[in-house]
Amino acid sequence: MESAPEHRAPAHYCEDVDGGVREQGHPREHVISPGPIETPILQGQFGDNTDAVREQFKTRIPMKRLGRPEEVAAAAVFLASDESSFITGIDLPVDGGVVAV
C-alpha cells in the first residue's frame, strides 16, 4: 500500500543531490516537518506582535510550548545516524504533537 504523497519523502531528492545518503545501494529519504520553532524568524515575521503570536501558537500545540532549534537538529542527526538504519521514506513531525491531534 502506497502512502499519501504528503506523507512520503520526495523520491527525487537522492537523485538530484550528488552523493545522497545511501545504505547498501538503497536511498534513505526523509522529510522533517517542524512546527513553530523559537527562532529569530518569529520576530522578523511578526515584529511587535511576536509575543502575542507566540502565545497563540502555544494554545494550539499539545505540549504548550514552541520547539527549540536543537530539537529539530536532533531529529535530523537521528535520521542521518545508524540508529535509524531501518527507517526510510518518513515524514517526521517535530511539532509538539500538532499533527497527532
Image: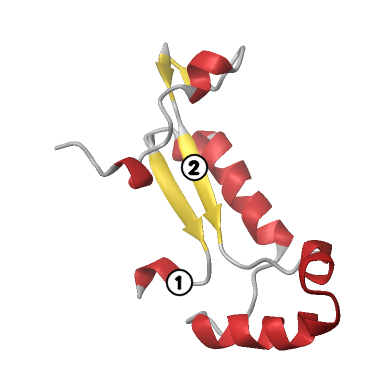
- Residue 71, picture quadrant: bottom right
Q: Quadrant of residue 99?
A: bottom left
Residue occupying image coordinates x 35% and y 75%: 101
Label pair 1/2, CB-CB below 8 angstroms:
no
- Specify the label residue 78 is tagged with: none
Which mark, by number, is residue 31? 2
Structural crowding at the residue carrying mark 2, measured as other residues with C-alpha within 10 Å and reported as few (<14), some (14–19) or many (≥20): some
Nearer the observer, 47 or 36: 47
Position above or below: 100 against 23: below
Residue 84: x percent and y percent? Answer: 46, 39
Q: Amino acid at mark 1?
A: Val
User: Could you tell me which residue is drawn at 47 percent across and 37 percent down?
Assistant: 30
Location of residue 83 in the rendering, given as x and y in whole percent from the top left corner: 49, 40
Report the residue marked by disc 1.
98
Residue 74 appears left or right of 59: right
- Circle 2: element type: strand
Task: Residue 8: give x, y in percent of width and height.
Answer: 36, 39
Mark earlier in primary sequence (1, 2):
2
